[in-house]
Structure formats: C-alpha cells, structure tokens
Image: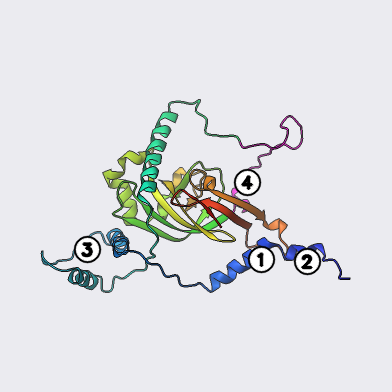
Amino acid sequence: MSNPKSAEEVQCNHPILQLLKDRKTNIQQPARRVVAFHPYHLLSHVAKAINTALPDLEVSTPHETTWQKCLDTVSKSLSGLDRKISIDPPIPTLRKRALRNQALQQAQAQAQASFDTNMSLTKPIRNQYDTNQEEPYPVVIPAALESQTLPTITAKVILEGIDDGSKIDTLENAVMLFDTGAHHTIISSDVLSPGFRDYLENDPVHDPYRLEGGCRVQLIANVEFTNTYIRLCTIALVVNRSAIPNSPSGIIFGQKGCLDSICFRSVPAKFLQPQDDDAWGGITVDRYIDPDGEIAMC
C-alpha cells in the first residue's frame, strides 16, 4: 500500500504552480508564429506604423506606375529606417462600429454625470447566501500603494483613433494593473510615442471623444495570463499621468470591456507551495469575449 502524499507534496503539484513554471519556460524559449492575411491588411498595417513614426516622410513616384515599382520606391526610401512591427488580425467592421457607439455614449454619460450627482456608478453582484445573516459578509480592505498587493499582467497593446485609423501606437510588453476598481481602462499619456500623443492632443478628429483633459481611443490587447493569452478589443481613456490617483505610469485594466469580458480564477501566491516571492500568484482564464463579440473558450 502506497503512502499518502503530504499536504506539501500536493501543493507542489498545484496546477496553477505548474502553469507558472510552464509560462516561465515558454518565455525563455519563444516560438515564432506565422500569420496569413490579404496584402491589403499587411500593407495598411505597415502604412499606419510608418505614418506614426515618420509623419514627414515623402516619396516621389510617377503619376502612372505599377504595384511593384511603387513598393520598390517605398522600400528604398525606408533604407536604414526599418523598424519592428507585429501583424495582428483585423477588427471586424461591426465590432469597430459598436466600439465607436460605446465611446460616444461614454462621453455623453460622463458629461451628464457631471450635472447629475445621483447617478449610480455601481451594480450589485449575485449573492448565493442569506444576506440577512451576520456571517459571512463582504469586507473591503484597501491596499497601500507601497505594499505590492496589486497584481499586474503583461500585454502587447495597439492603440488607434476611433474615427481615424491612419496612425497606430504599439506598446510591447506593457505592464497593466489588473484590478484596481477602475471603471474603464486608463492609459497615462507619458507611455505613448511622442507622435501619437501629439496626434491625439491636436487632431480635431478626436474632438467627439474628449472630456476634461482625456481622450478615448480604440485599444486592442494581446494579454498574457497564467494559462494562456487572450485578445481583447475595447475603448480606453488616455489622460495625463497627474490625473490618475497616486500618478502611476502605465495602464490600468478596467471593468468595462476588460474585466467584465473575462471569466477568470485567481490564486494568490500564499496558496502556492513553494511560494514565489516574485509573482503575485496565478490568474487563469476559462473563457472570454473575443473581438467578434463571441464567447471564446480557453
């Protein structure tokens, strides 16, 4: 008869802990992905990146030319200026239209809320216990900024204007605060490239989405979790760093379009053995709402 496993041995085989180990291994040995899209999508992605990074670049070409000659001319003009980009799937037109309507509604609602102090910003969760009982009861414990209590996640973030996709800004390996109670995803403007920041601040195409020093943008994020990475598309608010409580630099993963679009389970490091002092713990995603608005399983 075999001896029963000790509690420590069982915890060492915790699936969350194994996923964390596998993730570290995968990060050390990245796999090269190959994607296939129509040339229109590839060239438009490249064109947006060039327009953002080199807005003053001009290329001369005969009025009547060919596809190949035009591509060759552009390629020569970029000699010594090549930069790395990644090609992601396009966002469906209907989804972009829905995001635009959402951004307009948010701007209108925020303007109305400034005059209506009785407007509620909350919704209750479902309770499966008798709320009249003294125990259990929900307790809110605020985390001090210096206590390193808040989990962070990593993502590749792509930003575009809502009505104008002529420029994009890509943030590789962006670190986001995962759950701070923010209503919407918030981005501090100091993490943007100078060209894209100037584009948001000065181009009147963004005027319908401005309010009180902030500007709403379309956000596409490939987010890394413990067991997988997922792709989300939502609206984010870009503000000056000084406008955010405690003035953190970076991105705050908000409720609308992010946390309310994923079904996840979190296991803090205290419940993992051996404990990993370098990680908050594990966050695994079971399913989420993909850019098509459909439920995707992990």
Front tag of 3 and 2: 2
| Residue 68 pos. (x, y %) | 20, 71
Residue 130 drawn above or below residue 190: above
Name the residue at 46% across, 48% down: 293
The image quarter in which residue 216 lies? top left
Residue 276 can be seen, yes or no: no
Q: Quadrant of the C terminus?
A: bottom right
Secondary element at tag 1: helix
Sequence-wise, the earlier of marks 3 and 2 is 2
Depth check, front residue: 3 or 280: 3
**Disc on res. 18:** 1
Name the residue at 53% across, 74% down: 29
**Disc on res. 57:** 3
Q: Which residues are magenta?
A: 125-151
| Residue 165 pos. (x, y %) | 31, 52
**Disc on res. 143:** 4
Depth check, front residue: 148 or 38: 38
* Marks 4 & 3, CB-CB < 8 Å contact: no
Give the CA distance from mark 1 to mark 2.
Answer: 13 Å
Tell me the kind of residue under disc 4: Ala
Magenta-span inclusion, residue 132: yes
Sequence-wise, the earlier of marks 1 and 4 is 1
Residue 26 drawn above or below residue 138: below
Tell me the kind of residue under disc 3: Leu
**Disc on res. 256:** none
Tell me the kind of residue under disc 2: Glu
Residue 74 can be seen, yes or no: yes
| Residue 287 pos. (x, y %) | 56, 53
Decide if residue 128 is on the left or right side of residue 155. Answer: right
